[in-house]
Amino acid sequence: MTGATRTTTPRPARTRSWWGWGWADAHPDDAECVAMGALLPGTLARPLPVPRTADLRIGRPAVEAPRSLARTVTDDPAVRAAHAMGKAYRDVVRALRGRPGRIPDLVAHPADDREVADLLEWAGEHGVAVVPFGGGSSVSGGVEYRGDAHRAVLSLDLTAMDRVLEVDAAGRAARIQAGALGPALEDQLRPHGLTLRHFPQSFEFSTLGGWLATRAGGHYATGRTHIDDFVQSLRVVTPAGAGTSWRLPASGAGPSPDRLFLGSEGALGVITEAWMRVQERPRHKASAAVSFASFGAALEAVRAIAGSDLAPANCRLLDAGEAALAGASRDGSAVLVLGFESSDSPVEARLAQAVDLARAHGGREDGSRDGGPGNGGGPGGAPGAVDAWRSAFLRMPYLRDGLARMGAIAETFETAATWDRIPALIDAVRTEVGAAALKATGHPATVNCRLTHVYPDGAAPYFTVLAAGRPGDEVGVWDHLKEVAGEVLHRHRATITHHHAVGRDHRPGYDRQRPDPFALALRAAKGALDPHGILNPGVLID
Amino acid sequence: MTGATRTTTPRPARTRSWWGWGWADAHPDDAECVAMGALLPGTLARPLPVPRTADLRIGRPAVEAPRSLARTVTDDPAVRAAHAMGKAYRDVVRALRGRPGRIPDLVAHPADDREVADLLEWAGEHGVAVVPFGGGSSVSGGVEYRGDAHRAVLSLDLTAMDRVLEVDAAGRAARIQAGALGPALEDQLRPHGLTLRHFPQSFEFSTLGGWLATRAGGHYATGRTHIDDFVQSLRVVTPAGAGTSWRLPASGAGPSPDRLFLGSEGALGVITEAWMRVQERPRHKASAAVSFASFGAALEAVRAIAGSDLAPANCRLLDAGEAALAGASRDGSAVLVLGFESSDSPVEARLAQAVDLARAHGGREDGSRDGGPGNGGGPGGAPGAVDAWRSAFLRMPYLRDGLARMGAIAETFETAATWDRIPALIDAVRTEVGAAALKATGHPATVNCRLTHVYPDGAAPYFTVLAAGRPGDEVGVWDHLKEVAGEVLHRHRATITHHHAVGRDHRPGYDRQRPDPFALALRAAKGALDPHGILNPGVLID
């Protein structure tokens, strides 16, 4: 093991957007917004102005922090506004319309477990709701207080706890503080030749603690991609005390203590650090793109690949609309993006086998392979479709916010279901959400689908909805479409969320999906760990 | 999906031993017992007689089942005696010495969930403890009532619920009742070309429900081997109601409901069925054995293989003593048994890479490879060491019971720890348990070790202890040795159990290892689901 030495590469100072996704300087400008809006009939002629926190009426906090906690707590209005909501489309629109969620009274940036525990103790004594906050990228209302049952609201921002504290290189594990954002975490692992290899779309703007509390799905498409599988030990601070599970590669001693806190969304305790299983950086990579005239045939190809031993790192299937949106196809084909990685063995043979399986189901390989033998391809030589997909993937949330400024509906949601349900599920979401959007707005909507993660026994479809809004009532329209989608998911026994968490927005679906005995157990556990009911009230369970 | 058709191959009627492992007719006879005992100085001259249930004083049950449940409940003394204990060494010795654990008052064999629920309701009303019972192969006191806080004890034997109810071949999943023993379950999957691929040493004598309730480790040495990873959905009947989780390939909706019941050892509810992820049967196999003069070098080789992408199905390292005992080596070498499997791709290249890694750490390949190219090997052509290991593996528990009849100590226990702790941990167990045995019995003991499961971040050492007993006090000696072992494990932060469950025997270690917040949550969950405290009292939590 080596002690922690901070090795973060200095990054240029950039400003996070308080109201929209990511960096303030990465948002489309007014002209780009207008150009995008023109593609969707029925949107506004001019973009809504970028909102300013100075224009919000932010009152004095309802409570004051005790002097002992003054160092870690702020009542700065701009900081409070930036902690009022996550980054869902409905959050962005509420900010654009000057109606953000409840502004927290105070924001704390604790430096260690002791301060977290002190804050919880104070909050419990004073009836203050505590909303744990990592990167703030929740898209399901996970970091926003609703209701009025508490005297005040404290946003508990963990990002001051952002260090890799220990690295066990031989044992492939690292002890990492929960507030570390993706890039900071990888920067600190890189000098050891290691990586957590967890790259959600929100990577730059989300933290390890957020990933753990929401059971995040990684960028990788098969095998062990969920953050759950990479946890060796968790440290949790609760109002009823703190505890750390032992570092173990596996254990059969009772139900997994960590799995109760994974996905607990801040309702049972605050995850402050974890020993995570890390990996050597991949040295072998190869990727390819395959087109399919038929989406149904493409689904069969993906099922065959997911059921094989090939274990692609990337196996993303874009339907025709999604492929066109990403610039990966212009001829109405579905596109399958395949990628393989290994730290120790060449992967070209596995890629070739996967492409063969795709061809056997009617696929046609597009362009040349990246990293494959004989084409000299490297990271810079990616074929068009793969490259287009990668850039579009990271740019998407910014474009969503640009469309929101044009009064459009632009949002995504995801689910997962077993293979027997996938084709009908995707059809029903497209048809029913599309019909509801047409009815609500008077304009036809686009409902695209991609598979982000695939399993031998099922897949995770991810839907993009693009539609004109109903000026001034965009949130109402979206909430209605989401309700329609939730009904379809429930009817098809597809989970209300595959990796975006339950938060507050998915509560109706979650409450119906959760088995009754587990609801009883969860409620009892919450009562024992959070006797004053201060921890992220409203998520998961009441 | 296909409806269930029962396709079990008729098996010859054999009798299960009520007091010892497995089949009554597979136990060593008296002469074999004497021959084995002669290898351990200080054991008895003649074997203890095979105990008969007729010799036990079994009283009338303290309660009577209501007429509505009479069909499913028996008070037959022989059946009750066979449900009094599991199959740990200390259970076998207690039976041999005529002092078995508390004989349950009644044994129920429910046919469906309704009967399970009715039995729980009746037990709750009458203060009757309910001990769920699958194959009865617990080696940690998991199926035995201790204490006297309840009016009576009901053993809830699930083995009448032994059907594969549905198979989704395209989606690689099967709905299986919890009472299905390993062979019955595989017999019903085989016509579909599928397998659960879960082969613990107790495979013939343990059930799906037992595996789930104890988080069983499979026979396979790397990757997804724990039963936990193969669960798609669970059905659980609790005193507070029943529930079924949705069939999902993955979900991020709250903490996993299934993971709370996996490992719950009957204390939170009765698992009655599960949708399990099944696999195509492997068509490609290859195996090899590699010898090492140094155990430390062998550990490094195994760590390198476990950290690679190779994913061997078998990667068992036997120390010199264990290799000699299994007949896999006679020259004091440690032996690494490597095996690879795939349903869709040849595996010889992966085997060759693994053998190369082993050679790079000083290993020497023994004999020819099984299934490899150029040697014509098939399932019947296994090399000596691999073959010897396989036979010895299944025979071991019978030999243990033969040694128990000679008054010897013969038992195993297992753990898991991160790689940084493995060498010192194994040394300490060997030294301290060996010294304690010498002190307690006056005779030197054998303490062998093998690694049964290996991970990129650690390994699961499995210890075998062979020693003379202290005639009449074998249980006392073993309990003392286990306490010494438990202290070593705790000092080295190695789990009290990797795949043998907590039961009642491992409670002291488990109670110290379990994080406090999880203890609070577990106790609260137990109170909510089992308000009368009737479910397997004494395991996991009080």
Image: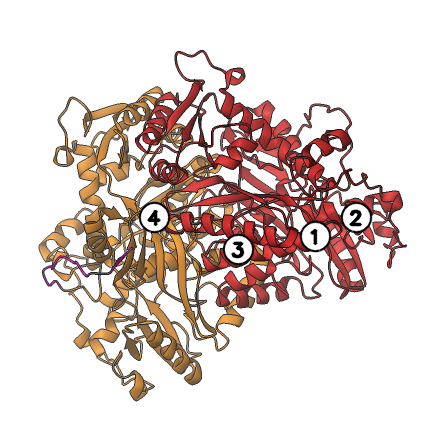
Chain colours: A red, B orange
Which amino acid type is marked by label 2?
Arg
Q: Nearer the viewer, mark 1 or mark 4?
A: 1
The image shows residue B98 at horizontal and vertical percentages of: 24, 71
On-image quarter of the N terminus of chain B:
bottom left
Of A43 and A197, the residue lying toward us: A43
Residue B161 figure quarter: bottom left
The residue to which callout 4 is attached is B171
Which amino acid type is marked by label 4?
Gly
Residue A4 among magenta residues:
no
Q: Residue at x 67, y 28 (%)?
A: A5
Q: Main secondary structure of the magenta part?
A: loop
Say which chain tag 3 marks: B
Of A246 and A116, the residue lying toward us: A116
Which portion, as a residue range, is magenta? B1-14
Of A168 and A495, the residue lying toward us: A495
Q: Which mark is residue A97?
A: 2
Residue B2 among magenta residues:
yes
Q: Residue at x 26, y 66 (%)?
A: B159
Does dot 2 land on a helix, a strand or a loop? Answer: loop
Does dot 3 land on a helix, a strand or a loop? Answer: loop
The residue to which callout 3 is attached is B514
Say which chain tag 2 marks: A
> Label 2 to label 1, Cα distance in Å?
10 Å
| Nearer-N-terminus badge (2/1) | 2
Does dot 4 land on a helix, a strand or a loop? Answer: loop
The residue to which callout 1 is attached is A475
Q: Is residue A502 visible?
A: no
Q: Residue at x 70, y 47 (%)?
A: A86
